[in-house]
Amino acid sequence: MASTSSSRLAVFFLITVLLSVAAPGETKLPLKQIPGDYGLPFIGAINDRRSFFYNPGQEEFFKSKIQKYESTVIRTNMPPGPFIASNPKVIALLDGKSFPVLFDVSKVEKRDVLTGTYVPSTDLTGGYRVLAYLDPSESKHAKLKQVVYFLLKWSRDKVFPVFEACYTGLFETLEKQVAENGKSSFNPPSEQAAFNFLTQAFFGSNPADTKLGVEGPSLINKWLLFQLHPVLSLGLPEDLDDLLLHTYPFPAFPIQKDYKTLYDFFNESSGFAQDEAEKMGLSREEACHNLLFATCFNAFGGIKVFFPIMVKWIGRAGGKLHTELAHEIRSAIKSNGGNLSMAAMEQMPLMKSVVYEALRIEPAVPYQYGKAKRDLLIESHDAVYEVKEGEMLFGFQPFATRDPKIFERAEEFVPDRFKGEAGEKLLKYLLWSNGPETENTTVGNKQCAGKDFVVLLSRLFVAQLFQRYDTFEIELGKAQSGTAPAVIITSLKRASF
Ligand code: HEM
């Protein structure tokens, strides 16, 4: 009797699997066990952590596992592991077909997974679980995301003039340093420009006119380190780097004074947005901690990493691309009455494609997580895998957006890849915002609230860059895991036509 019912169950399961795997006319993929192993308790996690950060490093770490197990869906540990994360076990999704399951909030839970297998203390965010850690099923998610949308809408008329002023300031600083020293580090003045821009566009408040002065970026960087140290490497000697950053969570008290300084600045500047939050039934204090987090972690943190990435890839592409961009950008501005406007940017297809290509080749936020809400089937290009409820899924985004089965010459920076009709068809595989570029951020999903805003800022940056310069040259400093590339500008040639 028992064996009849269990064989019925097995047949039922098989039929369910086949029905959900293969739509009519599609090839049927084989159902496979997810390969890979977690090693011995404790030791396996530490071995994987050291391989991930130091030898061979994250890209090779995943590549060697793909080769070893002949699969792009594998079981592995992810850092930090002991003693910061109690369970480092994940199922890694390492191709562009399996990765998007992480966007489906009916299948994955996005509660407390922003930073992966550990959660930074809420002492670092005023005692609140802020928006980015909330699953859309939690009632505050929609309200808090609405507040961010309100802020973005409120900033609309200020974006163009404020961006121009702040980034002209950046270019002047770079020029001065290159003239004086023969080179200039791009990252620190880029961070200053980003912070000045965000605070003035979002809150109409210039930090230079307040007690905060020019300290914003350095305070935020320290605060970010307290939250993200378990998944960063700072390029210190390996044993020291691992011991300091990946073994115990930093206590929150050394950063509390700095956080308070930031909080006071946001509290004084954001009254109008707190009014809006209050209308939605949120407390002013919770709203303010969320405004700080959205501006300093989400927006500043994203731009801090992505702008150097753009400059790195455009810089490396060389003079020929620079000349093409300068021609396209300047002639579009000319035919739009000499203004860098939205309409002018619509006539810059190469510039638009270059921004998308930078977002594709090196996603600024490379790790995404989600917990299976129920038993699931996940498809890669080659097979279907069964995942159990509660298992942690981890997507390594660079392998999704550099998947050779989706993108030709996937490892190359191809400036015009997203141009024209054929290019536009590829936008659904561009995933930098925690969702396809062809879909919209909503209160019901976990797609970046600033998705369209980021694309706009990146376009403005490239347009302003080639309005001002014919070409520029860069060098790269030593890259550190999980942080922005260190870009050094070595020459800037002012516009000659
Ligand atoms: C280059 C810059 C940026 C990048 C690369 C970026 C990327 C992302 C990613 C990958 C996520 C999802 C994280 C996850 O749940 O796994 C996210 C979420 C979010 N981003 Fe951005 N972002 C950027 C800029 C911005 C800006 C300018 C804002 C505007 C305030 C913003 C606001 C948010 C918010 C509020 C969330 C949480 C959304 C939610 O919980 O539903 N981001 N971002």
Image: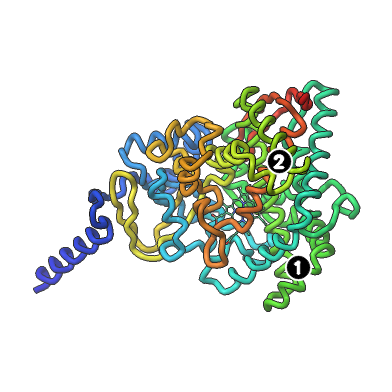
Give residue 129's position: percent from left, percent from top: 62, 65
Rounded to the nearest angstrom, the CA distance separating label 1 from label 2 is 27 Å
Left or right of 4: which side holds 443?
right
Q: Secondary structure at mark 2?
A: helix
- How is this picture coloured? rainbow
Between 36 and 239, the one lying in front of the other is 36
Dividing the picture into quadrants, the one containing residue 146 is bottom right
| Picture quadrant of residue 122 | bottom right
In terms of depth relative to the viewer, which is nearer, 265 or 233?
A: 265
Q: Which residue is mark 1?
A: 273
Q: Is residue 192 visible?
A: no
Disc 2 residue type (three-letter): Phe
Q: Is residue 314 visible?
A: yes
Query: Where does label 2 land, which residue?
Result: 461
Q: Secondary structure at mark 1?
A: helix
Identify the image quadrant of the N terminus: bottom left
Placement of the C terminus among the 4 image quadrants: top right
Residue drawn at x 84%, y 23% as measured from the top left? 179
Pick the residue in front: 58 or 187. 187
For the point 54% across and 55% down, which residue is it? 118
Q: What residue is shown at x 64% (from left), y 42% (from top)?
A: 347
Q: Amino acid at mark 1?
A: Ala
Horizontal and vertical percent for residue 157? 77, 57
Q: Name the residue located 79 percent from the left edge and 44 percent from the top edge.
A: 164
Dot 2, crowdedness within 10 Å: few (<14), some or many (≥20)?
many
Q: Hey, which residue is sitting farthest top in the picture?
A: 182
Query: Earlier along the polypeptide chain: callout 1 or callout 2?
Result: 1
Q: Position of residue 220 (x, y in %)?
A: 74, 50
Circles 1, 2 touching at the beta carbon (< 8 Å): no
* 1 vs 2, front mark: 2
